[in-house]
Image (cartoon, rainbow, N blue to C red):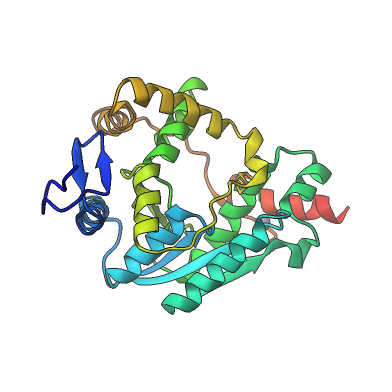
């Protein structure tokens, strides 16, 4: 198969766009699409200080690499979650990435404060690991983002589509109202953006490989029970039968949201009496967790 642009040998065929591209033209095509999302949705500009949340995986490292390449002011932020056989491997990948590219990466390790990893903590407080992990990551990221203008995450279109399916199945209007590639700043909670929202997981993996990024390929071992993986499987089956179904589903939702905005019933946010984090109750979930762990 030949590259549609230069007629050299193609390295990737993108079924939903019906084009085959060589390495050089795929990289250009990919970067142009990410840039278009950043500009069209006014995610950030070159004057902004951007904190990029990274896990050591293809999406987040690929995003950090791309933003540095396009001369944005970026800093990485990595949380070691203390997951056996996984977190230390991903942290080593992150460190090697940081050294090879000269990008500053802030590294946080939850075991320093709590002496155990997320799996152990989840057992102790009797919560599903992913729900606890999500809350802890959100808190720490928001806290780290205070000194920045915006926080970017590497969620791709497959992640967003799986989340959308889950939100629709539960008919969760609050989450549906908040599902967007751009979340505006709310008080001390900085603006959050997802520049890869329109990029598929396969494209993101291809970009990382073609750009020579050494990322962690294994899934988090605690993800096995995650419903999001189940939804991704169902959506992949749909895509197989109906190419382009995932992007039509996700883009259709975003378009519909523009003309029929769901209004989130917002509880007023107040500062946590312990740590000052914006929350809907007197003490935030993170401080309550800390208290539970101490006891
Ligand atoms: Fe955390 Fe669950 Fe993701 Fe593992 S799969 S990093 S536990 S949210
Ligand atoms: Zn608090």
Which x, y percent locates residue 45? 26, 65
Say left or right for 9 vs 50: left
- Which quadrant of the view contains residue 244? top left
Residue at image point 25% right, 50% down: 37
Please state which of residues 283 and 62 is positioned toward the viewer in this rendering: 62
Which x, y percent locates residue 234? 47, 24
> Can residue 48 be seen in this snapshot?
no
Residue at image point 36% right, 51% down: 206
> Can residue 259 be seen in this snapshot?
yes
Is residue 188 depicted above or below 168 in this figure? below
Which x, y percent locates residue 10? 22, 48
Quarter containing ligand 2? bottom right
Please state which of residues 62 and 77 is positioned toward the viewer in this rendering: 62
Please state which of residues 186 and 243 is positioned toward the viewer in this rendering: 243
Which x, y percent locates residue 102? 43, 79
Q: How many numbered dots are placed on residues in this image? A: 0
Is residue 138 depicted above or below 13 in this figure? below
Residue at image point 34% right, 30% down: 246
Location of the N terminus by quadrant is top left
- Which quadrant of the view contains residue 191? bottom left
Residue at image point 36% right, 24% down: 240
Say left or right for 293 vs 60: right
Farthest right residue in view:
295
């Amino acid at each position: 198969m030949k590259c549609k642009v230069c007629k050299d040998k193609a390295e990737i065929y993108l079924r939903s766009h019906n084009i085959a591209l060589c390495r050089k033209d795929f990289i250009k095509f990919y970067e142009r699409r990410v840039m278009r999302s950043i500009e069209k949705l006014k995610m950030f500009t070159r004057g902004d200080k951007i904190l990029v949340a990274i896990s050591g995986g293809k999406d987040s490292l690929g995003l950090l690499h791309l933003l540095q390449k396009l001369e944005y002011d970026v800093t990485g932020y990595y949380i070691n979650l203390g997951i056996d056989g996984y977190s230390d491997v991903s942290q080593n990948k992150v460190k090697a990435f940081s050294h090879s590219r000269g990008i500053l990466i802030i590294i946080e390790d939850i075991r320093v404060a709590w002496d155990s990893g997320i799996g152990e903590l989840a057992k102790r407080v009797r919560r599903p690991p992913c729900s606890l992990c999500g809350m802890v990551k959100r808190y720490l990221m928001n806290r780290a983002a205070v000194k920045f203008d915006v926080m970017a995450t590497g969620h791709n279109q497959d992640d967003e589509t799986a989340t959308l399916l889950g939100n629709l199945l539960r008919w969760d209007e609050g989450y549906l109202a908040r599902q967007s590639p751009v979340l505006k700043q709310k008080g001390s909670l900085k603006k959050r953006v997802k520049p890869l929202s329109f990029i598929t997981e396969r494209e993101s993996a291809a970009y990382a490989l073609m750009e020579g990024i050494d990322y962690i390929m294994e899934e988090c071992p605690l993800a096995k029970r995650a419903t999001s993986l189940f939804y991704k499987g169902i959506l992949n089956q749909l895509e197989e039968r109906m190419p382009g179904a995932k992007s039509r589903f996700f883009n259709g939702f975003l378009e519909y949201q523009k003309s029929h905005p769901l209004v989130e019933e917002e509880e007023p946010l107040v500062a946590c009496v312990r740590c000052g984090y914006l929350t809907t109750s007197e003490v935030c979930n993170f401080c309550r967790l800390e208290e539970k762990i101490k006891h």
